[in-house]
Amino acid sequence: MNEPKGKLVIIGGAVDMGTNLSAEEHIMQPHYIKFFERGILRRIINESAKGLGSQVEIVVTASQIPELVGQEYIRSFNQLSITNINILDIRSREDAQDPEVLERIRRADVVMFSGGDQLRLSSIFGGTEFLQILKNRYQKENFIIAGTSAGAAAASTNMIYRGSSNEALVKGEVQITAGLGFIDHMIIDTHFVQRGRIGRLFYAVASNPGMLGIGLGEDAGLLITEGNMMEAIGSGLTIVVDGRNIVETNIYDVELGAPVSIDGLKVHVMSIFDRYDISQQRLVIKKKAVIEEGEYLQLPDRDQ
């Protein structure tokens, strides 16, 4: 398959709306809904072909409080001088086939999936014309797909949809299903550093060593271009787990509920401006960046 002409942005999120707090708690405590990604949102617009004139569609399907989340996105993008922003609150597979909805994503320059429950995204959009249009545009056009939290976790062909952090390296505790499939050979976890999810990403990679594990912290994102070059954006950390050279694991021998051993995982830590070439398995670390008049200045690279 040819490298996609579009760009994919995956973001670790700030609050997992719809999984940690109930919808009622979110409504009673709206201060929990924060957009730590304002810098990332600006980068998304900068990368868009039409810049400030971009048409942005926010898909709030994953959220249990779509109206509140949608309004937060509108306010955040408005602060960046983006006024052509719309909310797609798709609640069912039937909604996803609405001709008006399909026409809106055909016209959009940026489509962004909000946080919430990634299983809602895969079960509502899987196999629909909606998803096929997005994939075709991502492959053939200068078009941006973005996702935060659940929207990021669902971006790959395979996604983690269940698994506790503290029991993650026990066989059977991490469960994986099909995602939306914008990118292959990758599995993505979010809120990664803050919720101590490294164990479940280790497990996911050990059980699928051909996939690259991506652990996105809060206010951390990756801009993926040409299908194989990842740039760290945002102020948070991203962990990359490479299992392609695993020496040995007992994951296929032990019984369900037993701890798992892994020998040979390779781990990288990325911060803002770092780049990782997926095809070359190579991380390029940026030296310290400085800020001048509100703009980051990138200093020379250092290979690792």
Image (cartoon, rainbow, N blue to C red):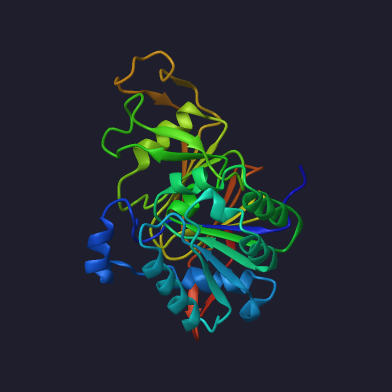
Tell which of 238 and 187 is nearer to you.
Answer: 187
Q: Quadrant of residue 251?
A: top left
Q: Quadrant of residue 69?
A: bottom left
Residue 284 visible in the current orientation: no
On screen, 206 above or below 34? Answer: above
Where does the image place residue 140, in percent across and percent down from the top left?
76, 56
Residue 252 visible in the current orientation: yes
Question: Disc count in the image?
Answer: 0
Q: Residue at x 30, y 19 (%)?
A: 258
Tell which of 199 and 109 is nearer to you.
Answer: 109
Q: Residue at x 41, y 40 (%)?
A: 161
Residue extending farthest to the bottom is 293
Where does the image place residue 294, in percent across and percent down from the top left?
49, 83
Where does the image place residue 103, in percent across and percent down from the top left?
68, 64
Quadrant containing the N terminus in the rendered view: top right
Where does the image place residue 242, in percent across and percent down from the top left?
51, 37
